[in-house]
């Protein structure tokens, strides 16, 4: 993804989470509803739960949360990172003979 | 009446909401964020197929409440009542399931006994060689756990409840058979009544007032796959291995397996062995999932009581109430426990007919 994309003037429809199709406005709305910690925000909006598992969106979400709540970067933290790093098919993980 | 609820899991929030609704001044103390413990890690199965009257009654009442909760809270809670199927991997397990089903039917739960052949015909995506039969309850189903947590939280705040996030309760102070205050990292908090709904933190908290709840800590691990078109209609539980399989409303297949009793020492850690075991179980039960990708795995620590029955009640101290549903039953019991316990806390007495639901097993 090109860095310039994020510099586009905010028009309300700027997508920040491609997996779950969430725009900047969606995230701001959820923050306004009161889900102001990153974990609750994740679970209410659904960002970071798609195929990228947060690798694409988390920095954008932290930026929005920091701007909106006037938080310093040191007050923001990442959500817990879960294995696997990339999606793995069940058939690769399963034991036993491949049919 | 001022009440402090320790723990913003599904049980704590249900009690807090019901108390606030009835006019109590309620503060909820939460160590991290609402639903950060087991409530948010659960896969959301709601079933009434228990082996004792007490649990069946609680689950039955809870699923009735869950069905109407969206309208009550003005918060969408998707409770999908597509049924819940228990599969038996061995003939002994099947006998056990049939025995339980008989008890459930006597309590007016609609449960059917099914042979492996019948199940295979009804759900063609299942590979029937891994089980001998099962029981199916059509009024059960699954709910999105966080929607219930958020729903109760929302309802609670609508009734002027006070939520204290990132506040750790470190101990209770008792004086003459009464709890005086709860100590937290934000200072002491006084109240008229205290509810301990701290999930796996319950035991250590109660030790500060010399109460010992005998429990063991079991680590569970869960995985979620990429979203698929909806096909997995009943939620499935494979006994006695304890494999739970559900498809969420977003389409992800979620699988939960009980691991070992090392929850206390290891904490909620994810392992590669689990991914392999769960993948083996999933692909042998639903062969079509071989190409489906796992997106993430996570873990949770379940605290189970010695007799696998919930511990609910005042445990001998006048203004202390403990609500501990035992090993992942929180989501199935919380709606009913919240209504029953909030009335008991406010009036000081248990409503007629609900005594048996608050029966507390003896403590060590």
Image: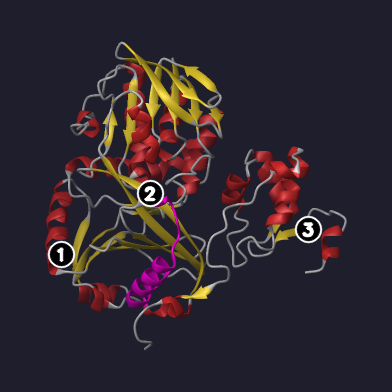
The residue positioned 25% from the left and 72% from the top of the image is B119
Q: CA distance from mark 2 to mark 3?
A: 45 Å
Task: Name above or below for residue B323 compared with residue B228.
Answer: above
Coordinates of residue B359 in the picture (x, y in percent)? 21, 32
Extreme residue toward the bottom, this view = A99
The residue positioned 59% from the left and 67% from the top of the image is A51
The residue positioned 86% from the left and 64% from the top of the image is A4
Answer left or right for B100 relative to A20. left
Instruction: Provide the chain ID for the residue under circle 1.
Output: B
**Magenta-drawn segment:** B265-286
Secondary structure found at label 2: helix
Task: Name above or below for residue B208 compared with residue B114.
Answer: above
Local packing at callout 1 (Cα closer than 10 Å; few below 14, some 14-19, many 20+) is many
Q: Specify whether disc 1 shares its chain with disc 3.
A: no
The residue positioned 78% from the left and 43% from the top of the image is A67
Return the residue at label 1. B94
Q: CA distance from mark 1 to mark 3?
A: 55 Å
Q: Which mark is residue A14?
A: 3
Answer left or right for B186 relative to B134. right
The N terminus of chain B, quarter of image: top left
Q: CA distance from mark 1 to mark 2?
A: 34 Å
Disc nearest the viewer among 1 and 2: 2
Return the residue at label 2. B265
Disc nearest the viewer among 2 and 3: 2
Residues at circles 1 and 3 in contact by the CB criterion of under 8 Å: no
Q: Is residue B270 magenta?
A: yes
| Dominant SS in magenta | helix
Coordinates of residue B251 in the picture (x, y in percent)? 49, 65
Front in this rendered view, residue A47 or B217: B217
Instruction: Provide the chain ID for the residue under circle 3.
Output: A
Secondary structure found at label 3: loop
């Amino acid at each position: 993804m090109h860095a310039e994309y994020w510099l586009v003037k905010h028009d309300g429809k700027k997508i920040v989470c491609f997996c779950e199709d969430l725009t900047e406005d969606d995230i701001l709305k959820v923050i306004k509803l009161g889900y102001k910690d990153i974990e609750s925000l994740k679970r209410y909006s659904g960002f970071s739960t798609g195929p990228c598992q947060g690798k694409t969106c988390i920095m954008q979400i932290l930026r929005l949360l920091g701007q909106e709540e006037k938080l310093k970067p040191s007050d923001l933290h990442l959500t817990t990172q879960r294995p696997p790093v990339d999606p793995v098919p069940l058939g690769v993980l399963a034991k036993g003979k491949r049919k | 009446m001022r009440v402090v609820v320790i723990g913003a899991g599904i049980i704590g929030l249900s009690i807090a909401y019901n108390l606030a609704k009835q006019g109590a001044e309620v503060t909820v103390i939460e160590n991290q964020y609402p639903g950060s413990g087991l409530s948010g890690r659960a896969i959301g199965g709601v079933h009434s197929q228990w082996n004792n009257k007490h649990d069946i009654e609680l689950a039955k009442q809870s699923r009735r409440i869950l069905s109407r909760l969206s309208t009550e809270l003005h918060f969408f809670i998707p409770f999908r009542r597509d049924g819940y199927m228990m599969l038996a991997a061995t003939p002994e397990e099947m006998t056990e399931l049939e025995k339980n089903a008989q008890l459930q039917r006597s309590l007016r739960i609609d449960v059917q006994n099914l042979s492996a052949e019948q199940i295979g015909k009804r759900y063609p995506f299942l590979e029937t060689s891994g089980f001998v039969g099962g029981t199916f309850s059509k009024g059960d189903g699954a709910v999105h756990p966080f929607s219930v947590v958020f729903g109760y939280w929302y309802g609670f705040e609508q009734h002027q409840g006070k939520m204290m996030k990132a506040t750790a309760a470190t101990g209770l102070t008792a004086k003459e058979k009464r709890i005086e205050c709860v100590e937290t990292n934000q200072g002491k908090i006084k109240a008229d009544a205290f509810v301990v709904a701290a999930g796996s933190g319950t035991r250590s908290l109660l030790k500060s007032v010399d109460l010992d709840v005998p429990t063991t800590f079991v680590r569970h691990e869960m995985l979620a796959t990429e979203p698929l078109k909806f096909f997995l209609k009943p939620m499935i539980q494979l006994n006695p291995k304890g494999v739970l399989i559900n498809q969420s409303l977003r389409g992800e297949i979620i699988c939960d397996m009980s691991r070992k009793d090392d929850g206390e020492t290891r904490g909620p850690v994810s392992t590669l062995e689990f991914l392999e075991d769960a993948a083996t179980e999933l692909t042998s039960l639903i062969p079509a999932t071989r190409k489906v990708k796992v997106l993430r795995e996570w873990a949770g620590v379940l605290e189970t009581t010695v007799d696998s029955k919930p511990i609910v009640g005042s445990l001998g101290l006048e203004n202390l109430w403990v609500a501990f549903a035992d090993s992942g039953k929180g989501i199935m019991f919380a709606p009913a426990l919240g209504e029953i316990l909030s009335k008991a806390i406010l009036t000081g007495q248990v409503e007629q007919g609900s005594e048996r639901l608050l029966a507390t097993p003896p403590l060590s």
